[in-house]
Amino acid sequence: MDNQAMDPQVPQSHPSLEASSPTGDQTEHESVAATLKNFSIVVGGPVYNLLLRLHLIRQTVPNMRRRFIAILAVIWLPLLLFSLREGMAFGHSVRIPFLYDFAMYGRFLFGLPLLLFAELLIDPVVRQAVSEFVDARLVPDQELPAFENILRRVQQIGESWIAEAIVIVLAFFPTFLFHHEWVAGALTNWHTTAQGMSTAGWWYAVVSAPVMRYVAYRWVFRYSLWPVLLWKISKLQLILIPTHPDRAAGVNFLATSQKHFGILACALACSVAGRVANMMVFEGAHLATFKYQLGGFVVLSVILGVLPLALWAPKLTDVRKNGLLEYGRFAETYTKSFDRKWVHCGAKPTESMLGTPDLQSLADLGNSFFFVENMRKAPITRKLIQQLAGRTALPFAPIIIFGTPTAVLVQEIIKLIM
């Protein structure tokens, strides 16, 4: 990041800090730039550092293939090998063989890879969004130390070994206390037969499921840092312009960033879709049975997806209210002057009204007031809601197609086309 001045009072013609800010400001900007360069709410923490030392991940490159292969070797391959050895990978020895278990595909071959890939996708997006507050000069110079302090404190929370320990305990603790992974279901399957737990079932209960829960719970914790960060930034004395054409006082870039978090809901939806597919195929359940659960999942995911941006509502409400007052007073002064000059001047105007810039200024003032009046209460757009809902519902598309009679499906498609 170049070290340009962030103070909006500095003329635009000044290209660098050397020409527009004292040495103290240069130092502060350099410090913030260094903090932004290393900032992350996605990576870091004791387990992440351990994986770095084991060379399972590398800090300079994503190397998702190595991570994916390593985690499949731990949680998927043993399940397959144990099921093959015990004759429960396919065939009719159990009602749901391992290779026919849709829940395992949804959880480990789709959901888990998406959660891992989400790090590669979301980390630079978060860093870019946070940097935009400085690059767009929304944070004035006097607030830069507080801004930097917020970044450091949030990152320290994310790298806390206490938080990491809590996530690990939550991931592994239910296995040993409730044994819910070991309880036989209504149908015999590869991990819980009528005779008891299979070897693959033990591995699933002790290793595979807890690892999956750890990755999911870790993302829950990391995602919770995002609204905390945005809330703290919103409490700063920012330079927000109510007439900004993005209708969000200049922070609509947050909506663009927020859509990428939809991959997390998509990953969790893969696991839900797999379990629903199992009940439809092996237990004869109908799709209509799950319409409220699937719809509720999508709605809840969208709510959680826009919640971090909704925290900006108090800030933008104040910006809009102050903007209406300020632009209202300015409009009052200008329109009175316009009226005295052109309407109630008491004599014929000395210049032609046709083509006068006064009319264009009056129109521009009206447009500015319109922008303020139509400001959003939060940087939440209809497009963002649609994107979050679409990414969440995407894994449900196969089971909806499978569970919908062909004639009904064709009729609905024709309705959409016509």
Image (cartoon, grey):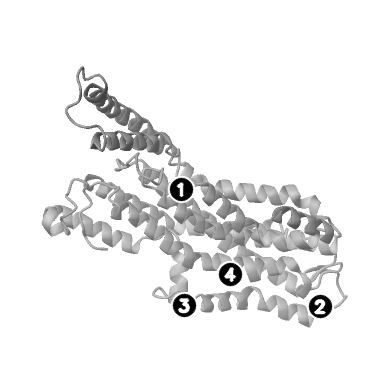
Q: Nearer the viewer, mark 2 or mark 3?
A: 2
Q: Earlier in the sequence, mark 3 or mark 1?
A: 3
Q: Nearer the viewer, mark 4 or mark 3?
A: 4
- How far is mark 2 from mark 4, CA to CA? 24 Å
Residue underneath mark 4: 113
- How far is mark 4 from mark 3, CA to CA? 20 Å
Mark 3 closeness class: few <14, some 14–19, many ≥20 residues within 10 Å: few
Q: Give the residue type at disc 2.
A: Phe
Q: Residue at x 56, y 63 (%)?
A: 215
Residue underneath mark 3: 54
> Which image quadrant for residue 156?
bottom left
**SS assignment at label 4:** helix
Q: Earlier in the sequence, mark 1 or mark 4?
A: 4
> Which image quadrant for residue 372?
top left
Q: Earlier in the sequence, mark 2 or mark 3?
A: 3
- How far is mark 3 from mark 1, CA to CA? 32 Å
Q: Give the residue type at disc 1.
A: Pro
Residue underneath mark 2: 90
As rendered, which of 269 and 358 lies closer to the eye?
A: 358
Q: Give the residue type at disc 4.
A: Pro
Residue 351 is left or right of residue 403, and the answer is: left
> Which image quadrant for residue 346?
top left
Q: Residue at x 32, y 59 (%)?
A: 36
Q: Position of residue 411 (x, y in %)?
A: 79, 55
Q: Nearer the viewer, mark 3 or mark 1?
A: 1
Q: Residue at x 17, y 57 (%)?
A: 27
113 lies above or below 380: below
Label disc, if present, on residue 227 of the rendered structure: 1
| Residue 231 can be seen in this image | yes
Q: Position of residue 381 (x, y in %)?
A: 50, 46
Q: Give the residue type at disc 3.
A: Leu
**SS assignment at label 3:** loop
